Image (spheres, grey):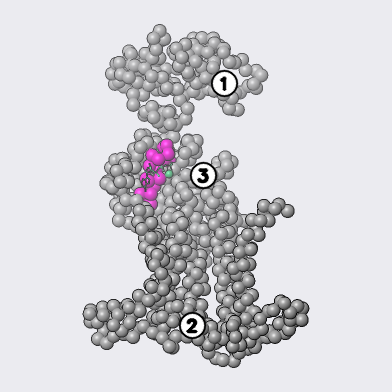
Amino acid sequence: MNFRRLFLIATPYFWLLALFLVPFLIVFKISLSDTAIAIPPYTPTLDLSGGWASIKSFFSELDIENFIFLTEDSLYWKAYLSSLQIAGVSTLLTLIVGYPIAYGMAQSSDSWRPTLMMLVILPFWTSFLIRVYSWIGILSNEGFLNQFLQWIGLTSEPLTILNTNYAVYIGIIYTYLPFMVLPIYSALEKMDGSLIEAAEDLGCSRLSAFWLVTFPLSRPGMIAGCFLVFIPALGEFVIPSLLGGSGTLMIGKVLWEEFFNNRDWPVASAVAVVLLLILIIPIILFQRNEQKQREADQ
Amino acid sequence: MAQPGNKPVFAPWNDPSKKPLIQFKNVTKKFGEFVAIDNLTLDIYAKEFFALLGPSGCGKTTLMRMLAGFENPTSGTILLDGQDIAKVPPNKRAVNMMFQSYALFPHLSVANNIAFGLKRSPMPKQEIPARVEEMLRLVRLEQFANRKPHQISGGQRQRVALARSLAKAPKLLLLDEPLGALDAKLREDTQFELMDIQEKTGTTFVIVTHDQEEAMTVASRIAVMDHGQIIQVDTPDKIYEYPNSVYVADFIGDVNLVKGRIGASDGEKYSINWAEGQPAIKAAGPAGIAPDTECHFAIRPEKVAIAMEKPTDKPNALQGRILDIAYLGNVSTYHVELDNGIIMKAQMANNRRISRRDLTWDDHVWVSFTETAGLVLVK
Ligand SMILES: Nc1ncnc2c1ncn2[C@@H]1O[C@H](COP(=O)(O)OP(=O)(O)OP(=O)(O)O)[C@@H](O)[C@H]1O
Ligand SMILES: [Mg+2]
């Protein structure tokens, strides 16, 4: 075997192993442990100095009790379900908001496109945390939005948006919009304009040409965008804790509380492992979509 | 050429009582400052097979796109059946276009691409599959019906595009280089299919092609374009035999062009002085060219005879030396360098085997032609 080739292949695998698999195994191990008032706050810890016997006793102390606990307390599965719902709904809303933006960008003249692209990615230049904080200023009862609505006379009482699920939706849509816009834009942009002309030539109105040609051809972009929003939104922690209320139940927030408020690392790890298992399905589907797209592009 | 002799001659352009199907009236199209179509006036009649010929970038596609409704003239009007079509959107025109880039829908199968227009026509749903089948058979793609466009070859894609534009049997069909990617045999077959369809359905065809032979074969009339203008519109034989300008003569087929000045003239007969110490060329041309006008004498190579001895029966005979022989199978082209360095091509049919032919390189020969074989061109 060619050494150079082996090296080239081994490098990404090494990083994958170091950055993904090893941390996952550590988390997985913690999820099988028990809480303890110690540093680190769980037992057993692996002590290699004790030799074979201590390794054996280490493994015998691991159990799936934390996973069973997750099924017993309704908080957890409710949090999973509510996370799925919030992530799902906000992905759909992001799609609805993002598609027209991407379409507009793809329709704009060549000289405008770089500017529009810039505007879409501009928010990344400031910290995510600061941007989410600023939404508090916009959405709160005395915030800009309510002031504006009252000023134009649409409402007399301030609307309570902050600390509800609505604020979480708004936060997720705002934060993840570029991840939706960019793949859709790239699908629309590489579409041959003469296809629309051909459709019109064959009897389509503008609108039906859009539905029959543009829309199906942008589907891979939409699918990619949806996954890129859904996957991180599912485990989102910052947005629900800053914008959401006490009633907002998201698994990312539960995870945080288990880790840092309850210091129950084993249960927190179990929550994380289950979250990962839930995400594996959409991640695999996402990879499939990308693969199919690459094949079609050839 | 397109019309067999025993039928009544199809020549509506000579009949003042016939109304053209398409009328371009002083149409100009500008892209910014660039003039793509320059004050063009043109009539195309129903049931014509009209070919547009011209160098790349001369505005052929632009002309088609204006007919299909994708571009509007900057000035001038286009009439279809006597109606100004400027305000009619593409989907409301009884016109179908085959795109130079094919523009096949990548997410639809071959069959669905062909059915696309039919599904948006008044045709009853249950008749569509039969029509699609018919089109697939026509372009010989039956076994590819379920493939996607990216799973077939370039020539097959071209045929799908052709089938798609034919499927709706429109009143006017615009074909932008419909056969360019096909091999010679398939191209010839498809040309005859197209002529057949035209004969059966009475559809008017406007076809862009880079292949003169194709234009000659299929077209009722040919328009030769250059820089957004039409230089000549005529039947294929007229275009070939009576080009109105050096440009057309040079663009269509092979031609010998000799620069000279009008000498003596007698009605439509001129003698052209073309070189010191050489006999003047006697040729026919349009009446009324003033003496001493600069002109070109144009003659097709196949009208130039070549012989070892000086022919006595031809009014024009020039001496030269064979420089080169291009053997093309059925014919050979002899490049003869005349005494003053001008090269004249003469073409002879190879009705004998090579071994029996007597002319060879460096032979001193005579090229000769009759008075009416060539043309005097002043443009
Ligand atoms: N949308 C456009 N914007 C600017 N210039 C254009 C546009 N479309 C065509 N042109 C120009 O107009 C001229 C005519 O173009 P057109 O496509 O009609 O050429 P064509 O005769 O079809 O050439 P070809 O044989 O290469 O297809 C070209 O010089 C082209 O660059
Ligand atoms: Mg063209």
Q: Secondary structure at mark 1?
A: strand
Cβ of mark 2 under 8 A from ligand 1: no
Amino acid residing under circle 1: Ile
Q: Secondary structure at mark 2?
A: helix
Amino acid residing under circle 2: Lys
* C-alpha separation, residue under disc 2 versus residue under disc 3: 64 Å
Q: Start and end of the magenta stretch? A: B51-69
Mark whose residue sits in front, 1 or 3: 1
The answer as to whether the residues below labels 2 and 3 share one chain is no
Return the chain for callout 3.
B
Give the residue at x 58% y 76%.
A276
Q: Would you name the residue on which mark 2 appears?
A: A253
Q: Would you name the residue on which mark 3 appears?
A: B179
Q: Residue furthest right?
A: A52
Q: Is residue B66 magenta?
A: yes
Q: Is residue A125 magenta?
A: no
Proximity of marks 2 and 1: CB atoms separated by less than 8 Å: no
The answer to whether B41 appears left or right of A227 in the picture is left
Circle 2: is it few (<14), some (14-19), or many (20+) Cα within 10 Å? Answer: many
Q: Would you name the residue on which mark 1 appears?
A: B325
* C-alpha separation, residue under disc 1 versus residue under disc 3: 31 Å
